Image (cartoon, rainbow, N blue to C red):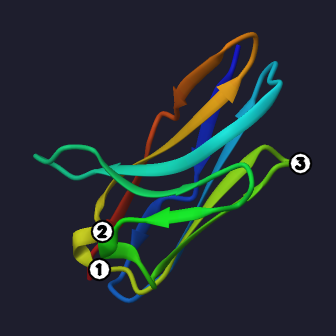
């Protein structure tokens, strides 16, 4: 069974930093694109950043220059380094991946809370 397990969320002051990790486990042939989404209270889930298997990245405008997505294919892990955090970054952050097993499917992590507050 394929799983995505996130870690690294928490409470941080404005201007602070956090690093999220998401590890894929199970019988996996390959990992295609991986990414991070977030959902704030009362809002729709939105894309934060994605990274392809080749390392190409995309970011939503509000996090450009502050967040960095990366991946370690050997560890089947995607990371989100978040700096200069703002209160509006407060949300549940979800890991997403397109994973090849015997077919190509999309998987989601359980979510990790990030709270930016003084």
Say which label, 3 or 1, has the lower sequence index.
Answer: 3
| Residue pointed to by mark 2 | 89
Say which label, 3 or 2, has the lower sequence index.
Answer: 3
- Residue 103, position in %: x, y? 68, 13
| Residue pointed to by mark 1 | 86
Q: Tell me what residue is drawn at x 26 percent, y 83 percent.
A: 118
Q: Tell me what residue is drawn at x 75 percent, y 10 percent.
A: 102
| Residue pointed to by mark 3 | 74
Locate residue 71 relative to residue 93 in the image: left or right.
Answer: right
- Name the quarter where the N terminus is drawn: top right
Residue at disc 1, secondary structure: loop
Locate residue 17 relative to residue 93 in the image: left or right.
Answer: right
At label 3, counting other C-alpha atoms closer than 10 Å, the crowd grade (few under 14, some 14-19, many 20 or more) is few
- Residue 17, position in %: x, y? 50, 80
Asked if 32 appears above or below 16 in the picture, the reply is above
Q: Tell me what residue is drawn at x 14 percent, y 48 percent.
A: 43
State how far apart marks 3 and 1 are (Cα). Answer: 32 Å
For the residues labelled 2 and 1, say whether their Cβ atoms are less than 8 Å apart.
yes
> What count of labels does the image hold?
3
Given residues 67 and 17, the one toward you in this image is: 67
Q: Tell me what residue is drawn at x 79 percent, y 31 percent.
A: 30
Closer to us: mark 3 or mark 1?
3
């Amino acid at each position: 069974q394929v799983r995505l397990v996130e870690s690294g969320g928490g409470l941080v002051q404005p201007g602070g930093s956090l690093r999220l990790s998401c590890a894929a486990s199970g019988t996996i042939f390959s990992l295609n694109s991986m990414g991070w989404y977030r959902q704030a209270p009362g809002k729709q889930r939105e894309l934060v950043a994605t990274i392809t298997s080749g390392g190409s990245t995309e970011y939503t405008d509000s996090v450009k220059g502050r967040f960095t997505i990366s991946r370690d294919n050997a560890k089947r892990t995607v990371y989100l380094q978040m700096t200069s955090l703002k209160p509006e970054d407060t949300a549940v952050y979800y890991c997403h991946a397109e994973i090849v097993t015997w077919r190509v499917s999309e998987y989601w992590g359980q979510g990790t809370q990030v709270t930016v507050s003084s």
